[in-house]
Amino acid sequence: MKNIKFVRVSRDITQLKVQMDTGISQSTISKYETGEALPTVENLMLLANYYDVSLDYLMDRTSVQRSYPNQ
């Protein structure tokens, strides 16, 4: 899950800031970024909305960061 870390670092956002904005603990974010844990669907959706990217991007299924259109 390299894109979870890449999008955060490329936007110069700390794990602590993500924690404060999303409610996902810093240690959990760290585990996602290092591959120690897989994100829950709920947390994937939170992160995709937070970074405004697609779930496919966060899951390394595409290199295109754009999010899906709102319904």
Image (spheres, rainbow, N blue to C red):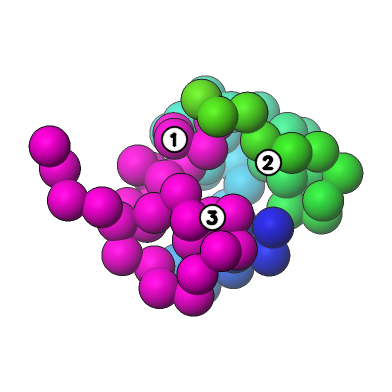
Q: Where is 69 relative to 11, above or below?
A: above
Task: Tell me the quarter of the picture where residue 45 sits.
Answer: top left
Instruction: Judge whether residue 59 is colored magenta.
Output: yes
Residue under label 2: 29
Reading the chain from its start, which is encountered first: label 3 or label 2?
A: 2
Residue for point 59% across, 54% down: 59
The answer to whether residue 26 shows anywhere in this view is no
Q: Position of residue 14 (x, y in %)?
A: 58, 53
51 and 12: which is toward the camera: 51
Q: Nearer the viewer, mark 1 or mark 2?
A: 1
Q: Where is 46 relative to 54, above or below?
A: above
Three-letter amino acid code of the residue under disc 2: Ile
Q: Which residues are magenta?
A: 43-71
Whether residues under marks 3 and 2 lie with C-beta atoms below 8 angstroms apart, the answer is no
Residue under label 3: 58
- Indicate the secondary structure of the residue bearing disc 2: helix
Mark carried by residue 45: 1
Three-letter amino acid code of the residue under disc 1: Met
Residue for point 50% across, 69% down: 62
12 and 68: which is toward the camera: 68
Counting other residues with Cα less than 10 Å from the Cα at mark 1, is it few (<14), some (14-19), or many (20 or more)? some
